[in-house]
Amino acid sequence: MQLVAPVPAPMVQAGRIHELDAIRGVALAGILLVNMGLFSFPALYLDPLEYWPGTWNKISVLFVNLVGEGKFISMFSFLFGLGFTIFLQSAEKKGHSPVKLFLRRLLVLLGIGMIHANFIWFGDVLCFYSTLGALLLFFRHCKPETLVKWAMGLLLIPVLLYMLGGMIVGSAWFADGGATTTAGTAAIDAYRNGTWQQLYAQNANDLIVTRIGYLIEAPVIFAMFLLGAYAGKRRIFHDPEQHIVFIRRVQLGSAMIGWPIALLSLLYISAGHSTAVYSYAQVFSSYIAGPAIGIFYIATIIRLLRCTTWQRILLPFQAAGRMAATNYLLQSVICVSVYYSFGGGLYAGIGPLAILWIWATIFVVQLAVSSWWMSHFRFGPVEWLWRSLTYGKMI
């Protein structure tokens, strides 16, 4: 592995920071990895560890939990906050009204998300990002240090409140009223065998459950928005080499915080759900380990991109990241076609190990198609539509 000497300048062309595209592409792969568990199985209601027999299936579930759950959505949330700062800075330089343009951008994203959530797949995150993202405007004039303080508060205070509630209320505080065998069985029947009307009804029901879950995760997501905005204000990704010492420290610190908590949580997941310690471990995993490891992934990719070999390896991910919205929506279209009744009908019919192979196949195809598309066009189809509607003209 040969390092570039001297280290290349940041990959910025026409105002675009291509390191961010590579990070976005990797996050896109991870988002699909995690979402496969919801595309293919009623994980909202049933525990895949208990449902699927076989050692390799259980190892596959635990692997996805360790490397994926909460980590890649943290990456995407960080990139969203970073993109917010870059967008406002760019709009201001071009003489636009930054706030008005950003709100229009979010409104278009909300429209795309509403179509996706109601007519394709209930797990849509675009609606939630577009509504929660509007709150970033209240922080646009904050100093970088203030953004970090708010982010740390959003991550740590819910953990403390959850632990306090457990001490006061006791075991009832950890009761899970959402996961039922009846609901899981109904979802399997609807998605595997249902008519269009039954699919729509089940999707609408699962959409409510999912949005409640996103509300619970809102402090984590918004904290990552703020950390991304912090990085944007400090212009860390405009010149990574100038900040490489800081990036190394962040990489080491986030690994030391995130991985031990994630591994501890994994041990309790594999042992069962019967103890309060398990619930505490889950909270620490969601609010601490997920964000920390997401940041670790980002810092690691930035450091890898200083190497010519890794620049070549990550080039297809860069193309996929440039059309991330298109690829995200296509993942839903492809997966519901594979698993739902109108397509392959494989819902809850194949185990987690086989699902990993399907995930790899889908994303390899997306990498190839993205590389071809971006060699012929400036934007992905959804990105083109999003920009055109945001600016009110054909881009």
Image (spheres, rainbow, N blue to C red):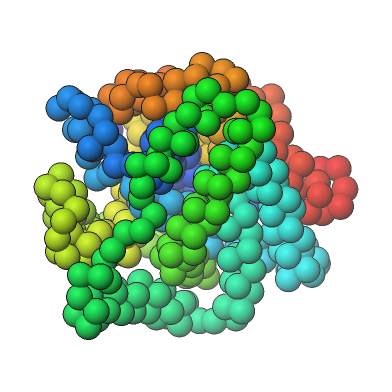
Q: Residue 162's spot in the image, x, y percent? A: 29, 74
Task: Give coordinates of residue 4: x percent, y percent.
Answer: 35, 38
Q: Is residue 79 left or right of residue 323?
A: left
In what quadrant of the picture does the C terminus appear?
A: top right
Which residue is more in the foreground, 39 or 241? Answer: 39
Nearest the eye: 209 or 141:
209
Q: Residue furthest top?
A: 344
Residue 66 seen: yes
Which residue is painted at 61% across and 33% down in the image? 198
- Locate residue 358: give its quadrant: top left
On screen, residue 119 versus residue 345, left or right, reads right
- Nearer-the-camera pick, 122 or 240: 122
Using the image, determine if residue 358 lies above or below residue 191. above
Quadrant containing the N terminus in the rendered view: top left
Q: Tell me where residue 330 appears, x and y as whole percent.
A: 59, 31
> In the orientation shown, which residue stands out farthest toward the front?
182
Q: Which residue is at the front of the view, 291 or 295?
A: 291
In the drawing, does residue 111 fall left or right of residue 286? right
Q: Is residue 252 visible?
A: no
Residue furthest right in the image: 393
- Quadrant of the image occupied by residue 170: bottom left
- Give the mark count: 0
Q: Residue at x 43, y 79 (%)?
A: 150
Q: Residue at x 61, y 40 (%)?
A: 201
Measuring from the top left, give residue 207's x and y in whole percent. 56, 49
Residue at the spot 59% in from the left edge and 71% down from the top edge: 136
Q: Is residue 381 above or below residue 183?
A: above
